[in-house]
Amino acid sequence: MKKVTSHSKISPQRRSQRLLRSSVSPNDKEILKGTNRFKITTKLVKEAFPLKVLNKDNKEKNASTSGCNIYENVIKDSKFTSKKNTNKENLNTHEIDNNTSSRKRSELCNVSGVSSNSSPDAQNQKAKSVLYTSHNGSKDTSYSFLSTQAKMQLSSWGLPAPVLKNYEEKGITTMFPWQTECLGLPGVLSGKNLVYSAPTSAGKTLVAELLLLKRVLETGRKGIFILPFVSVAREKMYYLQKMFGCCGIRVEGFMGSQGPPGGLKVTDIAVCTIEKANNLINRLLEAGKLNKLGMIVVDELHMLGDSHRGYLLELMLTKVLFMSSAQKEQPESQESGIQIIGMSATLPNLSLLAEWLKGQLYHTDFRPVPLTMNIKLGNSIYDADMKKIRELIPEHTVKGDSDQLIQLCLETVLEGFSVLVFCPSKAWCEKLAESVARAFFSIGKPSSQYPPIVSAKLREYLNPEAISRVLDALQKCPVGLDKVLQKSVSFGAAYHHAG
């Protein structure tokens, strides 16, 4: 009986020597005699392992389906390559061997956008600069040829050239590190649900846009983008039409009384309010065509807790979760189900929502622009630690401004900055904008009771020519120019709400 030797205590160098001795021909063994056994030529190793790759359990795998290069690994082991010199990023990098079949290289070229007529070296180099995603089955079979630095480049994510150009025109060529980390979570690129939270202006929407576009292009299925309000949904529809329309993606809006001729059947990406999205899901269920849907993006996921509309969003997501899981359990199904992407800046119970949606969880506090919180008590300004910073300037006091809100706006404008004030109701927005405009008119008059330097500085910042252009643009809107808005904009104040 042949004695079986355990390889658990054998060094990689000794193991590679045994593999070579058991695989080479007698002539090659003669060549090895008298030479340094650790200096093995690349040619000999390639001849010893023509079509076999060995994993940790010494089981054979098909070389055409494996991403690692056995030739390079054996050579590194035979030269006593130190593990300390191994870059962690290389563990996720799949080297492409020069002997890869022409069919496999052609597939990589198609993903990376390299012409198949280019040289093999150029093709291999370009193939390492794209991210390829597989959506077949629930198993994550994504391969990344990208380093951490390369992933931050928007051009490395396999997006169509016209879309990249549109992003470049908006000044977006790279991503923040947290965005690449979020996209790189296990399974996200291959269909696993995702719940993530980031502060306002941190770039949450870009993550959802990339996932939505890749999902629609790579699977040929439809996507739904859900926003809470009609005005926001309409704005997002126009934006996505401009960004994705160049690559043949049809983006349409389903909000209020608006809907495209042909409905969802002729639409690739539907931008909806919560109510319209629920109607679309119900129609797909009734027609037995829910498998035509590939992704649902829910912006402002905290609307689940809304006392009036939250139940509808929860009901819709519950139906999608149930039907998606049932679809993946079917033996004949090759689809990865419906991917749900939920994002918000104010999610208090992230882990609970991620568990309910059976998805990955990501949270960041990153802000591209630092946020400093100050508190006003009486006539004093304090920082977040309740340390007094300064007193309000008495000369800037506005008559009838009991809570000094208009005074704070005035001081900020005199510093050369703009102000954003949040109000609890639509009527409050309009009333406050009118009050600020009336105060600015009184302060900016040459005959004002305020110090001349304050009046002159305010008039300087309230550029009449710029205000006139804004009013002309508003008058050309289909709904015309509101009278209250006309009065307030004339003196540097405007309001915006969902109605």
Image (cartoon, rainbow, N blue to C red):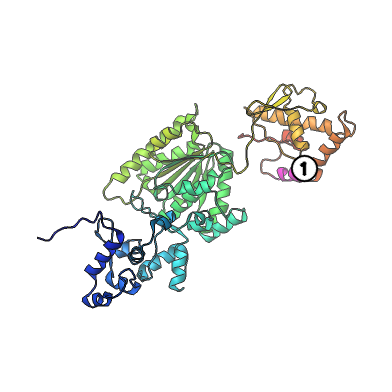
Task: Tell me the magenta residue range.
Answer: 466-476
- Classify mark 1: residues with Cα within 10 Å, few (<14), some (14-19) or many (20+): some
Report whether residue 435 is seen.
no
Res 109 → quadrant? bottom left
Please tell me which residue lies in front, 200 or 391: 391
Q: Position of residue 172 (x, y in %)?
A: 59, 53
For the residue pair 139 and 23, the one nearer the viewer reads as 23
Q: Nearer the viewer, residue 289 or 141?
A: 141
- Check disc 1 and report the residue beneath it: 467
Residue 335 is at least partly visible in this image:
yes
* Residue at 59 percent of width and 56 percent of height: 168
Is 236 drawn above or below residue 396 in the view shown? below
Where is residue 90 shown, x and y percent of the image?
Answer: 42, 57
Residue occupying the point 54% across, 42% down:
258
For the residue pair 76 and 133, the one nearer the viewer reads as 76
Q: Is residue 282 above or below residue 23?
A: above
* Horizontal side, residue 354 vs residue 445: left or right: left
Magenta region's main secondary structure? helix
